[in-house]
Image (spheres, helix red, strand yellow):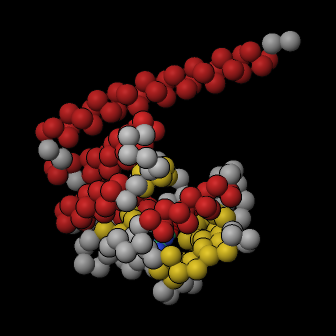
Amino acid sequence: MRVADVDAIKKNHVQINKDRVVKNFTQGHRKDLRFSREIKALRRLSGIDGVPALLAYSPAERWLAIDLIPGTPLPENPAAPDKLFTNLRVVVENMLRCGVARHSLPARDVIVRPDGTAGVVDFERCTLQHWRFSPIWWVARKVTQFHLLRLIDNHAPHLLTPKEQLRLQTCYRLSKAFHRCTRWRSRLRHYYRSQP
Ligand SMILES: Nc1ncnc2c1ncn2[C@@H]1O[C@H](COP(=O)(O)OP(=O)(O)O)[C@@H](O)[C@H]1O
Ligand SMILES: [Mg+2]
């Protein structure tokens, strides 16, 4: 058994055992919401190849147990095969079709399986689709697709089509502008709060 991650901000406690992973939502911001989101997302994704099956959970104690995805996280696999990213596209497309859009896709949450295909874990920060034409869902879908392209750009840029490269550049610009706005907003808030 190894303790994978006691994150300084989120404070989840993740225990990786031989065949299952136990995740405790012990502390941190909005732990009840994060816990229930992950349960709902895993239920929607049940049966998708590359997503761990939900084995057991306790809402009272805020822990869940899922199947271990054999393999290693992407950051420990600098020479991941192209097949990984092709398969990752399929896993992400399946996720979106099941109505689950991740808010980010860090490399550590992508598992390189022994056969070179992809596993994806950690669904506590996601948007769940509630109705077909929801504008929130539309944005969440675009955000997930942006993170997928960004991850491929970081690890295997040759796999991006020229159209995807263009799309990614536009997304980078939008993301930069968005972060500039949020920085200004927090500066202004700070300024007005400090006024007598
Ligand atoms: N089912 C799983 N199979 C294999 N590795 C996993 C599994 N679940 C989590 N991990 C590994 O543990 C790390 C931490 O788990 P995660 O669910 O992402 O917790 P956190 O919310 O703290 O990031 C993941 O980034 C991944 O590398
Ligand atoms: Mg994670």
Give the residue displayed 44% in from the left and 65% down from the top.
44
Q: Residue furthest left?
A: 162
Which quarter of the figure has residue 17? bottom right
Give the residue displayed 79% in from the left and 17% down from the top.
194
Give the residue displayed 53% in from the left and 81% down from the top.
55
Pinpoint residue 187: horizontal percent, then vertical percent: 64, 20
Give the residue displayed 64% in from the left and 55% down from the top.
33
Pinpoint residue 95: horizontal percent, then vertical percent: 36, 59
Q: Is residue 78 visible?
A: no
Q: Residue furthest top?
A: 196
| Camera-side residue of 117 and 8 | 117
Pinpoint residue 184: horizontal percent, then vertical percent: 57, 20
Q: Is residue 119 left or right of residue 18?
A: left
Q: Is residue 104 left or right of residue 156?
A: right
Q: Is residue 38 visible?
A: yes
Q: Residue furthest right?
A: 196
Count every numbered label the image shows and give the total.
Answer: 0
Pinpoint residue 195: horizontal percent, then vertical percent: 81, 12
| Camera-side residue of 194 and 127 | 127
Q: Quadrant of the C terminus?
A: top right
Q: Is residue 123 left or right of residue 98?
A: right
Q: Quadrant of the N terminus?
A: bottom right
